[in-house]
Amino acid sequence: MAISVTFLGAAQNVTGSSYAVEVDDAVVLVDCGLYQERALKDRNWAAFPIPPGRIQAVVLTHAHLDHCGLLPKLVRDGFRGKIYCTPATAEIVQIVLLDSAKIQEEDALNKAKRHAREGRRGPHPDLPLYTIRDAEAVLPLLTPAAYDTPVQVAGGIKASFFEAGHIFGSSMIRLDLGAAPAELSAPAELSAPAELSAPAKAVRTILFTGDLGRPNLPILQDPTACLAADYVVMESTYGDRVHEAAENIPDELARILNATQQAGGKVVIPAFAIERTQELIYHLSALLRAKKIQRLPVFLDSPMAIRVTEVFNRHKELFDDETKTLMGQGTEPYEFPGMIFTSKVEDSKAINKVRGSAVIIAGAGMCNGGRIKHHLVNTIGKPENTILFVGYQAVGTLGREILDGAKKVRILGQWHTVRARIEQLQGVSAHADREELLAWLQACAPPPRRVFVTHGEAQAALAFAAFVQEKTGWNASAPAYNQREVLT
Ligand SMILES: [Zn+2]
């Protein structure tokens, strides 16, 4: 039996997660992510290294674009199998892919106009990477798979999904390789819980962490403890860093809100639609209940974030104990006096007319698009207002410019002087840091034969592999792009 894993993305870089696992003729893709690092975006346009028609199934760890964003292209180029993921992930993936396709179409139009104006051609045709129609073709293939329940995804390959505690619906995935389908068809209720049993008759097991969350994040359950596996493929986004303590986040948030409210200003928060936004609302709601902030209007002005919040509300079974207890006491985590959801454009525009203090949460998280730009135009020039950043701001984005202290910024074609207060919430992260990654890995028993470190800048991935070797004595390495490893 020939068993292998090939690292098709997130190999000594962060985005474009994709791994091909092969058992004889069966091929399963773990994630099919979009490259978002500028230097690697060309890979989005290249032909898939494995013809999509040869791939039997895709298993998805979570709904972030760098893990699912190339699915429309995979399907357009011939993939016809099922795409397995948790039910919440399936719902969020639909929102994310349709939004991504819309952006691809808009980008292509803008690029075509610019190239026509400049009389030149870009490196790729001025066509979208994929269209809304391509994204729609993915949706019927999405196949919900429950947590902790093995499912046969291809000949000799069985997949199990476990809570990863990174974003809503996120999972680690263990593949049992070389298990004959017939032996695995016993009804689920007759088999022992997956985490307790050695996988039945599998020749090899490989565990993909996906993006690994952190203990004690709001709303989310903690990541599942490491499961027995022969091979572990683990992320290393913060493999060379330690986060600031997250305990101070509510206090910091209260300080910023109170100061701005005293000045009679507005707090404008560029926010990411999945998880970060819901976390913020959760904190605001808790601060109000504890009377650490005064009541004020809080606008969630992002149609995408509102749709994602609805997914949260449809899957309350995924909430952590704290959130469930809260709900048992009659408190809805995303509803409180003053919370206003604005889906419609008219309602969004009406926010400008609000007098006095308010909180405005709008996308996109790095200010590179979306309604946040309009709110920045209206608020950034006044000293009583605060622009509050709650997530990573990539180089080259408007968010990064503002955060880096630019005195003047160009927004929607006009220059604006920055007079608002600029703040950043420290310690906010949905990824485990170096110590948390190691602690998770050290709980793997028995020790895996090999640890493959992925999903980190080359420096972070290599540093973390060395760190693992040093601390555990286990065989750990950071595979290169397209590297293939035979799992003996
Ligand atoms: Zn992620």
Image (spheres, grey):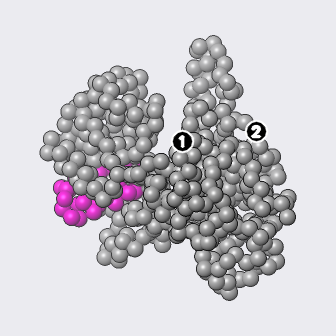
Residue 53: % across, % down: 81, 50
Residue found at the far left of this picture = 262
- Label 1 environment density (alpha carbons within 10 Å; few <14, some 14–19, many ≥20): some
Question: Is residue 181 visible in the rendered structure shown here?
Answer: yes
Rendered view: 69 above or below 402:
below
* Displayed quadrant of residue 319: bottom left
Asked if the residues shown at circle 2 and circle 1 are in contact, with their CB atoms under 8 angstroms apart, the answer is no
Residue beneath the point at 22% across and 53% down: 254
- Residue 47: give its label: 2
- Residue 459: give its label: 1
Under mark 2, the amino acid is Ala
Q: Nearer the viewer, residue 250 or 319?
A: 250
Residue beneath the point at 45% across and 54% down: 433
Q: How many marks?
A: 2
> In which quadrant will I find the C terminus?
bottom right
Kindly report the distance in space between the C-alpha atoms of the residues bearing marks 2 and 1.
28 Å
Q: On the picture, is 159 further left or further right than 168? A: right
Question: Is residue 65 visible in the rendered structure shown here?
Answer: no
Residue beneath the point at 19% across and 43% down: 260
Q: Secondary structure at mark 2?
A: loop
* Ligand 1 within 8 Å of the CB at mark 1: no
Residue 437: % across, % down: 50, 58
Q: On the picture, is 112 further left or further right than 433? A: right
Residue beneath the point at 25% across and 39% down: 386
Q: Is residue 19 magenta?
A: no
Q: Secondary structure at mark 1?
A: helix
Q: On the picture, is 199 further left or further right than 265? A: right
- Look at the image and give the residue range highlighted in magenta: 277-302
* Displayed quadrant of residue 230: bottom right
Under mark 1, the amino acid is Gln
Rendered view: 103 above or below 79:
above
Q: Nearer the viewer, residue 185 or 434?
A: 434
